[in-house]
Image (spheres, rainbow, N blue to C red):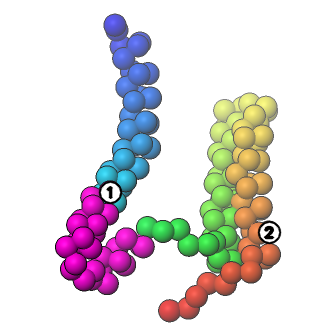
Amino acid sequence: MGPEIIVPIGAFAMIVAIVCLPFYFRSRERREMQRTLRVAIEKGQPVPPEVIEAMSRSVKTPPTRLRDLRTGVIWLAVGIGIAGATYFGDFIHGGNDFDGFGFACIPVVIGVAFIVLSFFNPNKEERV
């Protein structure tokens, strides 16, 4: 097994590790917290509010208008960045194919969809 096999396998293993390991560790931490909470309830001890807050911190909240707008602007910026890199990369190297514009349309359309959704979202951002 030479480097032509090990390098791609290592690259894919690294991607899997970066994506999957945080989910694994988060679920393991949550499982330990639930086990501790269950033992405390069985022994009749009161549950501190900090524990309940820590348990509910990772619960997803419904999307708000501001969050949708921010997400849309980020996706739009990513698409514009890809389009700009494609344009200037082909312009500098003398190519006229601009193949990356089709790829850049995907995040642009996602960004526009999030921006449009932000106008129709009934959930407002709570002011603190």
The answer to whether 103 is drawn above or below residue 46 in the figure is above
Q: Residue furthest top?
A: 1
78 relative to 99, above or below: below
Callout 1: SS: helix
Q: Secondary structure at mark 2?
A: helix
40 horizontally vs 55: left or right = left
Discs 1, 2 touching: Cβ within 8 Å: no
How far across and down, in percent of the image, does residue 99 sit? 75, 34
Residue 23 shows in the view: yes
Residue at the (80%, 75%) spot, across then down? 120
Which of 124 and 2 lies nearest the eye of the viewer? 124
Residue 87 visible, this angle: no
Q: In which quadrant will I find the N terminus? A: top left
Percent from the top left, x then y, of residue 110?
73, 55
Camera-near label (1 vs 2) is 1
Magenta span covers which residues?
A: 31-57
Separation of disc 1 and disc 2 at Cα? 38 Å
Q: Which residue is mark 1?
A: 31
Indicate the amino acid at tag 2: Val
Identify which residue is drawn at 63% across, 65% down.
Answer: 71
- The residue where tag 2 is placed is 116
Q: Residues within 10 Å of mark 2 (few under 14, many from 20)?
A: some
Q: Position of residue 108 (x, y in %)?
A: 74, 54
> Magenta span has 64?
no
